[in-house]
Image: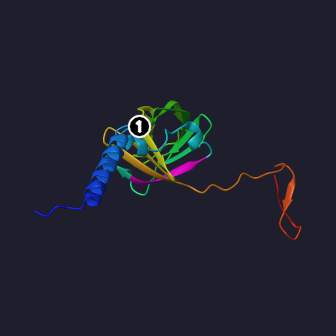
């Protein structure tokens, strides 16, 4: 074995010491977990003024050509599943969305639509887990997953509804 110069031994010793100090410093950090990357907790404010329509429902078969629609305004949730208009009070706690005081219109709904309205009201009242990522709201509970995307809502009309309105050329379009 050939002897190494002292400078080379000193460099290796210094590099080893530096590596040991660096690795020891890493132990002071909190471990990173999946929860660190999780989205912030959902709040009612995140949903206020927004409306969503289902693009996927797993674990429950919807009546053909129907969708689940949800709209949020303050503490109020509005829902549709193909026939009646449902409404209630919404609360969000720890990622769980719960609708209470559910009511709705009472139109006669053919072809299982009344049962679908009842199913949706029960699902929302049961407290599904709610996750909002960008414009997609996902609700899940007991093997049922409803994935909804945000709808573009037109701006509410402004002005006095009893005043006549006109188009760009000044002609009256409607009054009230």
Viewer-proximal residue, 16 or 69?
Answer: 16
Q: Is residue 54 magenta?
A: yes
Q: Residue furthest toward the left?
A: 1
Q: Going 84% across and 69% down the picture, which residue do you hit?
A: 168
Given the current orientation, which residue lies at the most extreme right position? 170
* Residue 33 seen from this side: no
Whether residue 158 appears in this view of the structure is: yes
Left or right, 58 with reference to 68: left
Residue 76, horizontal then vertical, whole percent: 59, 36
Q: Is residue 33 left or right of residue 164?
A: left
Magenta region, residue range: 50-56
| Secondary element at image label 1 | loop
Q: Nearer the viewer, residue 28 or 148?
A: 28
Residue sitting farthest toward the bottom: 169
Quarter of the picture containing the N terminus is bottom left
Q: Main secondary structure of the magenta part?
A: strand
Residue 43 counted in the magenta span: no
- Answer few, some or many: residues within 10 Å of disc 1's Cα (few below 14, many 20 plus, some between 14 and 19): many
Measured from the top left, where is residue 31 in percent x and y? 36, 40
Q: Position of residue 72 (x, y in %)?
A: 58, 42
Badge 1 is on which residue?
Answer: 128
Q: Is residue 48 left or right of residue 138?
A: right
């Amino acid at each position: 074995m050939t002897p190494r110069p002292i400078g080379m031994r000193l460099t290796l010793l210094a590099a080893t010491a530096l590596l040991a100090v660096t690795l020891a410093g890493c132990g002071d950090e909190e471990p990173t977990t999946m929860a660190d990357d999780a989205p912030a907790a959902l709040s009612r404010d995140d949903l206020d003024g927004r409306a969503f329509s289902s693009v996927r429902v797993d674990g429950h078969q919807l009546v053909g050509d129907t969708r689940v629609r949800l709209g949020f305004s303050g503490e109020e949730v509005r829902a549709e599943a193909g026939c009646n208009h449902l409404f209630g009070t919404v609360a969000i706690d720890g990622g769980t969305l719960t609708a209470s005081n559910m009511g709705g219109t009472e139109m006669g709904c053919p072809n299982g639509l009344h049962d679908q309205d009842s199913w949706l009201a029960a699902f929302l009242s049961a407290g599904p887990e709610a996750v909002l990522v960008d414009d997609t709201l996902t609700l899940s509970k007991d093997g049922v997953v409803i994935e909804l995307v945000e709808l573009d809502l037109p701006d509410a009309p402004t002005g006095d509804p009893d005043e006549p309105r006109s188009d760009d050329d000044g002609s009256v379009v409607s009054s009230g």
